[in-house]
């Protein structure tokens, strides 16, 4: 409410600059919270290490990457996992704006914001993994790769999807700044950007999997299949919604003061609905995995150490959470739904890391395999913490959870 009141005084660029400077100041009663105390030093150290990496390259002691293991945690976790967790944005925008399910409307802005920040920070981590990071524009212009390369497709989809999500979230920015005319125009663009964004998401979620098709003889047979792109797309549905459940559980406690009574009451129904969607998509994913296993005739590999690891992923972190989602949704057991979401997220992390370096060249001795350095881990934590700080800054200032101003809700649905 305070931010919206201040926007009425913005009449020129001087007022705008003063308003932004006021908004940059911390908001809240306490600065020395446990999260701030832990995350702030990590962010500062991470920024220093990022600068060090950009100057000195990818070699030791920065990373343990090599010609044998060219992808590490910055690709496996920051990009592969981060983009999968951002899948909740395209799923819920499809449900709300295309299927017209208003039940999920209260969380749509937070979900889109989370997806936008995930692409900005996690997809942006690609820059850190490039040996010659100043050539980041090469995939976009097709230089060295060609316009028929999967990387060209994924690069353009990432860029365009970030712009689409920015347009989807832009009405909240206009409301924060009190830009009524811009809010009207941006609100009219929402449906088009949603349709465009959904199309891009279905392509680049699978496109990430298509990048792995070139490593056929390097990925363990239990994980490699020509259907990797489809599996990546289907898994992004329940990965993204599990992140929505996990993130929503935290934010609805941290920002409970911004929620009205109607929003708080509807969240239980939203949680149950998300659990049902996760259960259906996870069963479809498990069914596809079984079909692939039968088609490739890899039953004998299940009795090997990598086979046990495969069963841990597919049964322990897909099938079991699927049944937990079913039971939790049926009996409205919210704790069971939240636990299932955490297990599902863990399964997605393991699945993506398997493709990148665990089940990749599994035949190489453990002593010669890739293990991330402490610098890689700190930089990854820095990226995660920075995204949380930015998310919190935006939510404390823009109408993400709280209701927009009355002038913005007349004739608009987003």
Image (tube, helix red, strand yellow):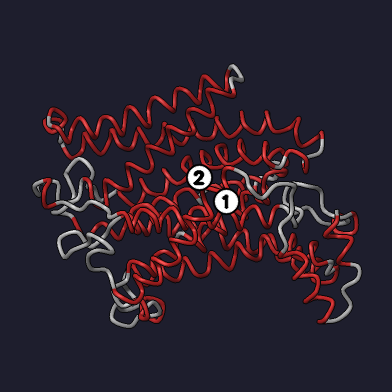
Q: Nearer the viewer, residue 357 or 57?
A: 57
Residue at the far top: name it: 331
Q: Quadrant of the C terminus?
A: bottom right
The answer to whether residue 111 is above or below residue 242 is: below
Tell me the element at label 1. Answer: helix
Q: Mark 1 points at which residue?
A: 89
Q: Which residue is drawn at 63% across and 63% down?
A: 193
For image coordinates 81% across by 82% down, the residue present is 13
Tell me which numbered mark, 1 or 2, is placed earlier along the sequence. 1
Q: Position of residue 184 (x, y in %)?
A: 81, 66
Query: Is residue 313 positioned above or below 408 on the image?
Result: above
Whole-percent x, y for residue 47 in the image: 45, 65
Residue at numbered disc 2: 240
Circles 1 and 2, Cβ within 8 Å, touching? The answer is yes
Residue 333 x %, y %: 58, 20
Task: Please tell me which residue lies in front, 236 or 288.
Answer: 236
From the viewer's side, name the closer residue of 294 and 386: 386
Left or right of residue 349, residue 238 in this image: right
Q: Which quadrant would residue 347 be assigned to in this image?
A: top left
Image side of residue 95 versus residue 312, left or right: right
Pick the residue in front: 101 or 209.
Answer: 209
C-alpha separation, residue under disc 1 versus residue under disc 2: 7 Å
Residue at figure coordinates x 28%, y 33% from the top left = 290
Q: Residue at x 34, y 69 (%)?
A: 151
CA neighbours of label 1 inside 10 A, class few (<14), some (14 to 19), many (20+)? many
Q: Residues within 10 Å of mark 2 (few under 14, many from 20)?
A: many
Q: Is mark 2 on a helix, strand or loop?
A: helix
Q: In this view, does 22 lie above or below 289?
A: below
Which numbered dot is residue 279?
Answer: none
């Amino acid at each position: 409410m305070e931010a919206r009141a201040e926007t009425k005084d913005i009449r020129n660029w001087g007022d705008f600059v003063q308003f932004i400077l006021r908004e940059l100041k911390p908001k809240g009663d306490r600065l020395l919270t446990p999260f701030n105390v832990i995350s702030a030093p990590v962010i500062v150290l991470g920024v220093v290490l990022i600068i060090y990496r950009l100057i000195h390259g990818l070699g030791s002691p920065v990373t343990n990457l090599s010609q044998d293991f060219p992808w590490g945690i910055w690709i496996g976790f920051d990009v592969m996992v981060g983009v999968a967790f951002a899948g909740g944005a395209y799923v819920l925008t499809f449900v709300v704006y295309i299927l017209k399910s208003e039940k999920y409307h209260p969380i749509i802005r937070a979900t889109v914001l989370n997806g936008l920040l995930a692409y900005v920070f996690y997809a942006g981590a690609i820059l850190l993994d490039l040996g010659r990071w100043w050539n980041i524009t090469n995939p976009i212009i097709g230089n060295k790769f060609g316009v028929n390369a999967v990387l060209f497709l994924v690069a353009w989809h990432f860029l365009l999807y970030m712009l689409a999500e920015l347009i989807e979230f832009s009405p909240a920015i206009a409301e924060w700044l009190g830009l009524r005319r811009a809010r009207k125009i941006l609100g009219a663009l929402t449906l088009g950007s949603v349709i465009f964004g959904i199309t891009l998401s279905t392509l680049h979620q699978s496109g990430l999997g298509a990048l792995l098709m070139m490593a056929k003889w390097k990925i363990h047979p239990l994980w490699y299949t020509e259907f990797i792109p489809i599996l990546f797309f289907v898994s992004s549905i329940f990965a993204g919604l599990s992140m929505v459940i996990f993130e929503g559980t935290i934010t609805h406690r941290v920002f409970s003061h911004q929620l009205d009574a109607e929003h708080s009451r509807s969240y239980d129904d939203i949680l149950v609905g998300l659990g049902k969607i996760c259960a259906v998509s996870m069963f479809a994913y498990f069914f596809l995995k079984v079909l692939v296993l039968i088609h490739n005739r890899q039953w004998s590999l299940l009795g090997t150490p990598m086979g046990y690891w495969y069963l841990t992923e597919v049964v322990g972190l897909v099938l079991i959470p699927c049944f937990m989602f079913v039971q939790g949704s049926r009996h409205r057991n919210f704790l069971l739904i939240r636990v299932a979401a955490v297990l599902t997220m863990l399964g997605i992390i393991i699945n993506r890391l398997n493709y990148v370096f665990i089940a990749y060249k599994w035949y190489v001795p453990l002593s010669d395999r890739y293990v991330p350095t402490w610098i890689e881990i700190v930089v990854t934590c820095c990226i995660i913490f920075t995204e949380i700080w930015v998310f919190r800054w935006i939510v404390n200032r823009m109408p993400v959870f709280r209701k927009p101003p009355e002038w913005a809700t007349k004739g608009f649905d987003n």
